[in-house]
Amino acid sequence: MALRQAKALTQATEAPASASTRSGRLFFLAIVFLYWFSSYIYVPVLAPYVEHLGASYVMVGMVLGVYGLMQILFRMPIGIGSDYLNRRRPFIWLGLIASGASCLLFLLGPEPGWALAGRAVSGIAASAWVVYSVMYAGYFPKEEAGRAMGMLQFTMVIAQLTSMLLSGYLVEHWGWNAPFWAGGIVAALAVLIGFRLPEQQQARGESAIRLGELVPVMREPMLVKVSLLSVLAHCVLFITMFGYTPNQALNLGADKESLGWLTLAFMLPHAAATLYGARLLRRWMGDRGTLVLGFAGSALFTLLIPVMPDFGALCATQTGNGLMQGLIFPLLLGKSVSDIHPHKRATAMGFYQAVYALGMSGGPFAAGWMSSLYGLKGGFWLGGIAAGAAALLSFIWLRERERTSVKIGV
């Protein structure tokens, strides 16, 4: 199903939504909220926590990077398995159980190896997200698929923001293990609620996207280029806010409770730019100009992180980085399927998601190696270079795109 996500958005049920369907949507969104809450409750303190355990920066990078690696390995098998069995609920439960198990693994001991195992299992939990996306689309008529994804994305962002704001507070008042206990309890509650979720099956005889169709899609030049840009974008994101920026804040003398303000400084402009920024700027600057601005701005703010003199200045860099990165991700997502024939867009989306997970994995690991050599500033240098390279590639590749447009599978 990772190969069919886009297809599911256009093949959702055409029946009008009833009152019971609306109740089902709200029930499902509640599960989504708990799912992401339990998965992100410890993210702002993860790198500082692993460093607190005595791990080297290389080990910190491994813990951060294994999250993306597990998604590379499990995202497509989970999706294909859900389609093959024509079942959604078992994979929804898998995501919830894995999220809770991840938190419990962190609690098993103070050795960095348990943190590595916990973060690996959280990557399995995140791999189930594509099933959530497809199942929620099934609650809507096909002409409302865009609104469905908007509501689902909004719920995810709110859950992540809420949980990440609480993370530092919990550590400051109840110790390093408090976020993991909270995440495990929330996940357990979600599993209990999730058992009441009705199954959703596709009509028999529905045609399926075949794995063999991945090969011609992979030959489409613009999809490959956009996917590689997304690798660099995710490198920067998982090196900075979802990686080592909290460590830098603590090095500047911030307390753990203040990490909530750091999160807020990033997430609010990031969410606003995701919803409105790219759409408004595209009218004035076009896709290429908007992406070049987003990547170049992210490069600047990432390079500024290690030279900021105090916590307030560091928060200012996160506000800028959140805004710039919020311009990037919606554009890349849209361009990944914009020139693909409709019945092959699911395949393109599966390829896109599998490729960008490389950035989630490789970026933090490489930054950990750089930090072991040059201190934290080395990791941020790497993030800034990645963003700068992406800005240059966006300028070159999208200029080529404007000269030619080729649709595949027509």
Image (spheres, helix red, strand yellow):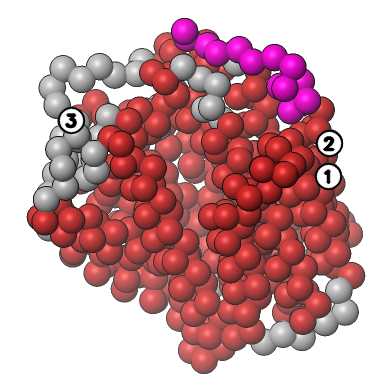
Q: Which quarter of the rendering shows the N terminus?
A: top left
- The residue that appears at 36% across and 48% down in the rendered structure is 147
Residue occupied by mark 1 = 388
Residue occupied by mark 3 = 202
Disc 2 secondary structure class:
helix
Disc 1 secondary structure class:
helix
Q: Position of residue 323 (x, y in %)?
A: 68, 60
Q: Nearer the viewer, residue 352 or 107?
A: 352
Is the residue marked by circle 2 packed among few (<14), some (14-19), or many (20+) residues within 10 Å? some
Q: Is 153 above or below relative to 210?
A: below
| Mark 3: amino acid | Gln
Q: Is 400 above or below relative to 302?
A: above
Magenta span includes 319: no
Disc 3 secondary structure class:
loop
Magenta span includes 405: yes
Q: Position of residue 166 (x, y in %)?
A: 49, 79
* Left or right for 108, reference 194: right
Residue occupied by mark 2 = 392
Q: Determine the CA span between mark 3 and mark 1.
A: 44 Å
| Mark 1: amino acid | Gly
Of the image marks 3 and 2, the number of the one nearer the N terminus: 3
Magenta part of the chain: 397-410
Q: Is residue 50 visible?
A: no
Q: Nearer the viewer, residue 264 or 358?
A: 264
Q: Determine the CA span between mark 2 and mark 1.
A: 6 Å
Q: Position of residue 232 (x, y in %)?
A: 71, 41
User: Is mark 2 in CB contact (under 8 Å) with mark 1?
Assistant: yes
Q: Is 98 above or below relative to 230?
A: below
